């Protein structure tokens, strides 16, 4: 039971980190170019507002919780599965904070690059957006677009690196079995399958 609880704590830590980053990130980018969310994204059914605060809050959660889940489950398995001693939660928290800080720096640098490339005319808005977005926001849109792309890229690659390095450092424990034996193994496998289903539904099948 303690083993299962430790897995859940790691998953919640990853989700909380991803969502917190997303909210802070989108509070900034929504104020730079609200059209990135209201025009370049499909509307959220529960959001009926153009307030940068509300838009940043809603998208900060909607666009990141699935990333936290997608990385949280393998991180929990890689860091907590027997027979090696589990990785302390505090140690994982520090590693995740470092990753989030790296993502923030990358987002800022890539955002500045996107703004400058747009300002110099090297890059232009994606086709179809130029008539929908005010011309005064063209460069800001590119900055926000690049910043979001950098956050996703560094977040996913950095998260995978943390998972693999943690797994290697613990002697590569067997984290999943095709036919699990015992209650904890069965529960872990069911949770992984359920999480994968939720992530796939939210990203590809939700209307």
Image: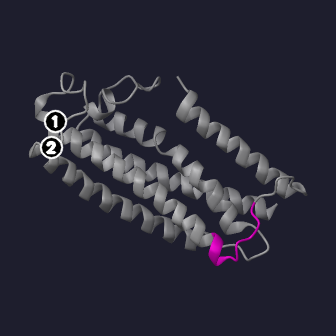
Disc 2 versus disc 1: nearer the observer: 2
Name the spot of residue 29 as percent of width and height, x first: 28, 44
Which quadrant of the figure has residue 3?
bottom right
Q: Which of the two discs, 2 and 1, labels the residue nearer the N terminus?
A: 2
* Residue at x 18%, y 27% (from the top left corner): 130
Q: Under tag 2, what secondary structure? A: helix
> Up-down: is 80 above or below 132?
below
The stretch drawn in magenta includes residue 4? no
Q: Are marks 2 and 1 in contact (CB under 8 Å)?
A: yes
The stretch drawn in magenta includes residue 170? yes
> Up-down: is 92 above or below 159?
below
Question: 114 or 101, which is in the foreground?
Answer: 114
**Residue 141 visible in the displayed image:** yes
Question: 201 or 54, which is in the foreground?
Answer: 201
Q: Which residue is mark 1?
A: 138
Answer left or right for 132 relative to 135. right
Q: Start and end of the magenta stretch?
A: 167-175
Name the spot of residue 91 as percent of width and height, x first: 56, 74
Which residue reaches farthest front?
A: 122
Answer left or right for 96 relative to 122. right
Calculate the distance from the C-alpha at mark 2 to the C-alpha at mark 1: 8 Å
Answer left or right for 201 relative to 141. right
Name the spot of residue 63 as percent of width and height, x first: 45, 40
Which quadrant of the figure has residue 122?
top left
Q: Under tag 1, what secondary structure? A: helix
Magenta span: predominant SS is loop
> Up-down: is 141 above or below 188?
above
Please give the label number shown on residue 118: 2
């Amino acid at each position: 039971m303690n083993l299962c609880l430790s897995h859940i704590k790691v998953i919640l830590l990853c989700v909380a980190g991803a969502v917190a980053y997303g909210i802070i990130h989108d509070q900034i980018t929504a104020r730079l170019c609200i059209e990135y969310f209201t025009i370049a994204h499909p509307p959220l059914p529960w959001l009926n507002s153009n307030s940068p605060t509300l838009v940043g809050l809603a998208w900060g959660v909607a666009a990141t919780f699935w990333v936290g889940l997608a990385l949280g489950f393998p991180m929990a398995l890689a860091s907590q599965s027997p027979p090696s001693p589990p990785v302390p939660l505090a140690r994982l928290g520090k590693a995740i904070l470092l990753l989030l800080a790296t993502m923030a720096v990358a987002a800022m640098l890539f955002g500045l690059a996107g703004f400058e490339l747009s300002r110099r005319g090297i890059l232009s808005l994606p086709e179809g957006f130029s008539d929908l977005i005010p011309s005064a926001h063209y460069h800001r849109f590119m900055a926000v677009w690049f910043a979001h792309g950098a956050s996703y890229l560094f977040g996913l690659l950095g998260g995978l690196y943390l998972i693999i390095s943690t797994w290697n450092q613990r002697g590569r424990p067997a984290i999943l079995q095709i036919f699990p034996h015992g209650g904890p193994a069965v529960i872990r496998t069911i949770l992984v399958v359920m999480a994968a289903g939720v992530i796939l539904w939210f990203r590809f099948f939700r209307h």
